[in-house]
Amino acid sequence: MKTAIAIVTTLALAATFGCQSASPRGGGMAQNEGFQIVVPSSAPELKQGEVQTVAVSLQRGELFKRDVKLEIRPSKGISVDPTSALIKASAKPDVQLRITAAKNAAIGEYRVYVKGTPETGEATQVEFTVKVVAP
């Protein structure tokens, strides 16, 4: 019975929170004044030599109306384009990252670090994992 309850609770949490992960709040301490960076929570898989597009977005509080500069830094073995982006307060809060695994990239997991700095207020950062697999 305890196992069944644990499974149902886990599935309910996964359904509620989806397949994304978010950074700690930046920009302001109150929920409606700040922002979070939302990245994939499950590791995208790339074959060696492959390019894949991954979405990164800002989740803004109702009162957060500032530009945010994103700095994107991959670990060695993969590359990301763009490595920086300015998300204007009036623009859509999404950035499409092109992640490339080199043809000779070692098979394994790599990290991508994303830092968001608002024009005023506190910066925040988050990371996500990319898995490189054999072609």
Image: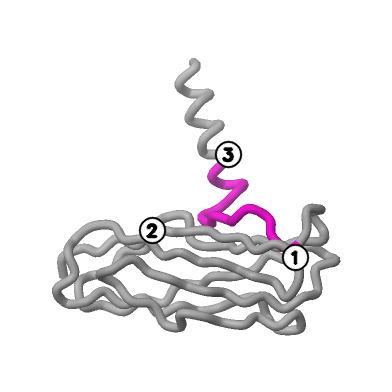
Give me the C-alpha separation between circle 2 and circle 3: 24 Å
User: Based on the displayed image, in which of its 4 quarters is residue 102 positioned?
Assistant: bottom left
Q: Is residue 2 magenta?
A: no
**33 w.r.t. 97: above or below:** above
Q: Which residues are magenta?
A: 13-27
Earlier residue among tags 3 and 1: 3
Q: What is the three-letter code of the residue carrying label 2?
A: Thr
Q: What is the three-letter code of the residue carrying label 3?
A: Ala
Give me the C-alpha separation between circle 2 and circle 1: 27 Å
**100 w.r.t. 129: above or below:** below
Identify which residue, 1 or 87, lies in the foreground: 87
Q: Which residue was labeled with disc 1? A: 121
Dot 3: within a 10 Å radius of its alpha carbon, few (fewer than 14), some, or many (20 or more) residues?
A: few
| For discs 3 and 1, the disc positioned in front in the rendered view | 1
Q: Is residue 24 magenta?
A: yes
Quarter holding the C terminus?
bottom left
Disc 3 and disc 1 in contact, CB within 8 angstroms: no
Q: What is the three-letter code of the residue carrying label 1?
A: Gly
Residue 12 horizontal/vertical position (percent): 58, 39
Residue 12's disc is 3
Q: Secondary structure at mark 1?
A: loop
Q: Is residue 124 left or right of residue 33?
A: left
Earlier residue among tags 2 and 3: 3
The colouring scheme, among rainbow, by chain, secondary structure or one colour, is: one colour
Disc 2 and disc 3 in contact, CB within 8 angstroms: no
| For discs 2 and 1, the disc positioned in front in the rendered view | 1
- Residue under the image location 62 percent in, 82 percent down: 86
Residue 57 horizontal/vertical position (percent): 60, 70
Q: Which residue was labeled with disc 2? A: 129
**109 w.r.t. 103: above or below:** above
Residue projecting furthest to the right: 63
